[in-house]
Image (cartoon, rainbow, N blue to C red):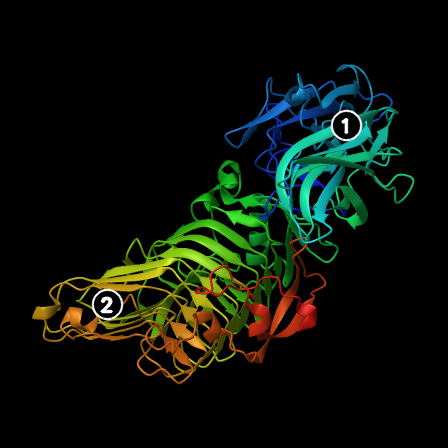
Amino acid sequence: MNMTRRMKGVYILIPLLCTLYAGCDSKDESLMSTREIGFSTTVASSEAEPGTRAEATTDNLTEMGVFAYFTGTGNFSNGSSTPNHLYNQSVKKTGGVWTYSPVRYWPANANEKVSFFAYAPHTAAVSGNANDKIRIAKPTAFNAPGRPVISYSAPKGELDLLLSTGVTDCANTHGPVQFTMKHAMTKVVFKVKTGGSDSKTITGISTECASSADFSINDANTAVTAENIGTSKSTCTATVSIAVDGTAKTVKEFFLIPSHPNDTKVTLTYADGSGSTTVTATLPNVTPNDWLSGKAIGYTLTIQNNQITAITVNSDITWDELKVPIPSDTDYDYIIATAEDLAQFRNDVNNGKIRPAKALQVADIDIQDLATSKYFSNDVTDWTPIGYKVEFQGVYNGNGHTIKNLKIKTGKTSQGIGLFGQVIESLLVGINLRDADITVGSPITYTGTLAGTVDQETQVNYCSATGKIRKVPCNADGGQPYITGGLIGDAKDASIILCHANVDIGEGGIYNHTSSAAMNACTIGGLVGYMSTNKSRIASCWSSGNIKLGPIPANAGYIVTVGGFLGGDAHSGDIYGSYSLGSIALSFSGMASSGDTRTVNAGGFIGTVNAILCTSCYSYTPLSLTYPDIDSQGNIGTVNFGGFTPLDYSTFRYCYGDGSVLPRTSYFNYKISCYEFSDSPNSTSYSCNTLGGKTVQEILRPSSKIRSSKTFRCAKYDSSINAYYTMPPMLYIINWDSDNFWKQTPADPTYPEINYYVDMTSL
């Protein structure tokens, strides 16, 4: 399958399914005339707050109009081809599936061609409205020639009109036809602030604009053309309730016809406690026409003394100002827009087709979309990882998009499972897994939602995961415990920074494929299961999932290590500015006939540590234990708990562990050991009984700045547009420090917060 290359500029991808292979030029001579023409959509979006936006998104784009031109063996001609196959066909999304009636079919003859155009929303979606009227100006009927022209009049300013470039001269193919949907309107963003220290509540805003226009795709088939623009004006009005002060706040975003009339008035209505005031001003023109199709322009209005005293213009903003923009794709091998793109990319990696591989994700993806796939339907319930048996090497830039409903219910034998299995010498950035669901049913050495293992200087930046890992594998091959982590199983040689996992682990119990083994060992961590080399380091990450493990049987030699953030380590490593919430609940079953040989070490932050340097970290993870018949047992094995870590062989600097919710030694007849922080905290480690009059915020961020002794490589992140620029790789070599990576003023001083908006260039 050829991956879809993404063109420069902001647009929306709407695949039209020819079959399930990409590209209109992939011929299949066996294709019969009974093959239906089907539709699916993906719309670029982000997790940023939508504010007052009305852009089309994956969720809210529910109807579009499609034109299909059957041209026999000839090519599409704007002067003579007619939409005889589909004319302004309404295609609606119901239950996530795009449907239309009557269904149309591909021609049986591979030499015959069909060309496609689309727009959204469909005329029926806005018919009957007093404002925002759209109609088909051309072609006038199914037997009239020409590409579509959409007429728009009486704007209200709420319509995000989209037109596709043509997908022309397609034969009966196996690949999705991708509509390149372009914004026809200008997005006009109004921000308001006061000129002094007072505050006001904006209750209404209106702006003038052109009253009508016709829209089409130009002859080069690349850009939207606005023509026949009306000379009269309309007024677009919105009622709002937004408090403003000396800091500019977005009040309204209008979608307006791309023509900035002279003497365009903007009006604000606001209340300040003494009544309601209305003020009006004229919007300046930066150029003769600074309102352009598919562009955004911003105005910041300053109000003082009951008048608009200044208007600042920002004409250099992208349409998706607060959404995910389009990084340059010229250096990427793969553009990932759909679940099928992701699955095919995985196959190419695993088959050794390309190495190293560079992929850019350009839309939110739901793995369950593969349910109708001819080639990848098995991945709906049991995803085969990227880097399965053959390590992934390269770049995967998720650019802040999500991958939903990843499910693994595997019987495969593997060194590592997750979205990725084994990763080496790579950059994973901006990947957000949502509702992952993993059930281990085979001997898996390393399990994580994002990756089983990361090694050889792999960088993991701005990644997150939510979901479940239902079963925890527990055994030992050659003395190596099985590893499970909420985000990553084993960090062998990796730099992990600004990541988060909210993954519940263990509700399905323990998977033990060799119950008679002399040793059954497992290590579990809320974010990372294990740090197995001294080259790994973690900074500004947190975990919030719940770990539930048990019942741990008594008839085999179990060695269980569990930490709310990190399971354990084999060598030295470094953790800076990180924390764990969530909870840990362990349970034992029965008694061993010849004494209990189970060994359990559980810590709110780390399960066991050997030589880790841990700086400016904390844990609020409660721990609990269910251990039946403990009083009647003579030998109960070794059980240790710690609010931060149970066993301390490391260095902790400016760290805090909340040990107020722990199993108490006295509850279990003094047969287990519990430590509020650890068994031997050093002088700069604190627990709830040793705060010494300090707040946790003061412990983690003392008056003198803390700076890491090790450096991290981190991708540039631009918070103003929520984007990662990684090709060519723009990785900053930085030191973590407490002033920049902890928020200066967290919402709750009890819970210091990570600052995700660090200016890497200043470090």
Residue placed at 64% from the left, 63% from the top? 356
Q: Secondary structure at mark 2?
A: loop
> Which residue position is annotated with label 2?
663
Which numbered disc, 2 or 1, marks the residue closer to the eye?
Answer: 1
Residue 749 vs residue 413, the one in the foreground: 749
Q: Disc 2 marks which amino acid?
A: Pro
Residue located farthest toward the right when viewing the structure as drawn: 288
Image height of 386 relative to 136, above or below: below
Q: Is residue 449 above or below residue 711?
A: above
Residue shown at 16%/73% (left/top)? 636
Q: Is residue 374 above or below residue 74?
A: below
Location of mark 1 (residue): 235
Whether residue 38 is visible, yes or no, is yes
* Name of the residue lying farthest toward the left: 632
Give the residue drawn at x 74%, y 37%. Answer: 182
Q: Is residue 145 left or right of residue 495?
A: right
* Residue nearest the viewer, comparing 210 with 734: 210
- Give the crowd class for mark 2: few <14, some 14-19, many >=20 residues within 10 Å: many
Mark 2 or mark 1, earlier in chain: 1
Tell me residue 277's x, y (percent).
70, 36
| Residue at the (71%, 22%) spot, across then down | 131
Query: Could you say where residue 631 lies in the image, as x and y percent from the top left?
Result: 10, 69
Q: Is residue 285 above or below residue 557?
A: above
Count of numbered badges drawn on the protein: 2
Quadrant showing the C terminus? bottom right
Q: Secondary structure at mark 1?
A: strand
Residue 46, percent across and down? 60, 47
Examine the image and state in which quarter residue 359 appears. Answer: bottom right
Nearest the eye: 25 or 657: 657
Residue 448 picture quarter:
bottom left
Looking at numbered disc 1 in the image, what kind of residue is underneath it? Thr
